[in-house]
Structures are given as C-alpha cells and as structure tokens.
Amino acid sequence: MSESKGSAAGDRKTQVSAHGETEGGTDSKKITLKVNGSYHEFVVGRDIDEADTLAYLLREQLGLTGLKVSCDEGACGACTIIMNGEAVLSCMILAVEADGHDILTIEGLASNDPVVEAFAEQSEPGYGTALQCGYCTPGFVMAVKALLAQNPQPTSEEIKGALSGNICRCGCYAAIAKAVVHAAEKIGRRR
Ligand code: FES
Ligand code: FES
C-alpha cells in the first residue's frame, strides 16, 4: 500500500508472507483506488488478498471505520458507501473490483454537509430522532447522499424505495424519512 500501515495491516502482511506471496513475487498485481479525493495503491497478495472485500480494505487498511459491517452478506445496508456516484454495499464488492474507481465514504463528507446536518438535527428534542445507537447512520447518510444527488426532491415513496435496503434495528424509520426531507430542503436553500 502506498500509505503507512497500522498494526492490522502489519498482521495481514505477515500472514500473507507466510504463504509465500511476497512483494515482488508473482502475485504483485497493483490496484489503485481514489478514496475521498486521495489515491491509494495496494499490492494484491501483499496488502490485500484477492478475496478481501472493499469494506475490509476501507476499514482495515485505510482506517475508515465509519462504514459498518453488520450482516456481511448484503442484507442490512450498514456498509453503504458511494462508488462513482452510486450507493453500493461495500461488503458485496471485492477490493480488486474497485480498482480504478472513485469512492466516497462518510469520512469524506464535510461537517456542514446538508445530509449530515439534517441527521444531526433530527436527533434534537422535539424532532423525533433519526438515530439512537447510530450504528446504521453512516449507511443511511450515504444512501441519502446518493439519492438526493440524483433526485433532489424525492417523494415519500421514492425515499422509502431508495432506503429499503437499509435496516435500522432501533426503528428510527419515520424520523430518518423526516431527515431526508430536511436535507432536501437544505440543499434547495443552498442552491
Ligand atoms: S454489512 Fe453490507 S449489507 Fe450488511
Ligand atoms: S439507530 Fe440504532 S440501528 Fe439505527
């Protein structure tokens, strides 16, 4: 990897080396990802395995732990990120499949991002709450970012449809829908 690695990455390197796949060996295919505006290069067989998911790479190699891995099988939406403008489930994409793609995680959003603000405000008394434990929130925020980029004034049915793959175990769905409406209003006012 082109960036310095943490202990988890170091462990992985040791593990991979134990299988004889070392830097400069036969499995030295490189992949490059643009993540939150910065380019990162990884050597397959050294930094990552062919079978590693994009969620693994983002969390364990780049330390972008905003996305959560809950079901790890495409059923909950907690790992949602944006790839090339589309909301995708990072647990269902291999890291090698993301080669050359443009990735946005919740860490890449500005603190005054209208969707971030709307979710934060929706946790204030009197608003109902769009987040309790917050485990699902990064996935919802990224799904909403992608939705509003493509459809700035979604109907309630369109909101339900766009977020149907995201599960909130705390049951905050009604307030999450309100947060989407407020985020759309903020985006409209900032135009
Ligand atoms: S962790 Fe990816 S969809 Fe649940
Ligand atoms: S706020 Fe707890 S899972 Fe959604």
Image (cartoon, rainbow, N blue to C red):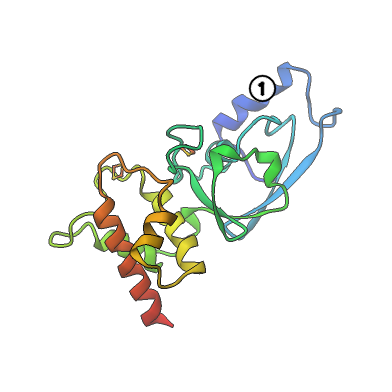
| Quarter of the C terminus within the rendering | bottom left
Q: Is residue 3 left or right of residue 111?
A: right
Residue 36, x across and y down, in percent: 57, 57
The residue under label 1 is which amino acid type? Thr
Q: How many marks?
A: 1
Front-most of residues 38 and 7: 38
| Res. 135 visible in picture | yes
Residue ID at (40%, 46%): 166
User: Is residue 27 toward the left or the right of residue 182 in the image?
Assistant: right
- Vertical placement of 167 versus 37: above or below? above
Q: Residue at x 78, y 41 (%)?
A: 30
105 or 40: nearer the viewer:
105
Q: Which residue is mark 1?
A: 14
**Farthest top residue?**
18
Judging depth in this view, the residue of 151 and 80 nearest the camera is 151
**Residue at 84 percent of width and 31 percent of height:** 24
Is residue 3 placed above or below 114 in the rendered structure?
A: above
> Where does the image place residue 140, in percent across and percent down from the top left?
40, 52
Side of 29 where 2 appears, left or right = left
73 displayed left or right of 3: left
Residue 98 on image: x %, y %: 67, 46
View extreme (left): residue = 126
Quadrant assignment for the N terminus: top right
Quadrant housing residue 125: bottom left
Local secondary structure at mark 1? helix
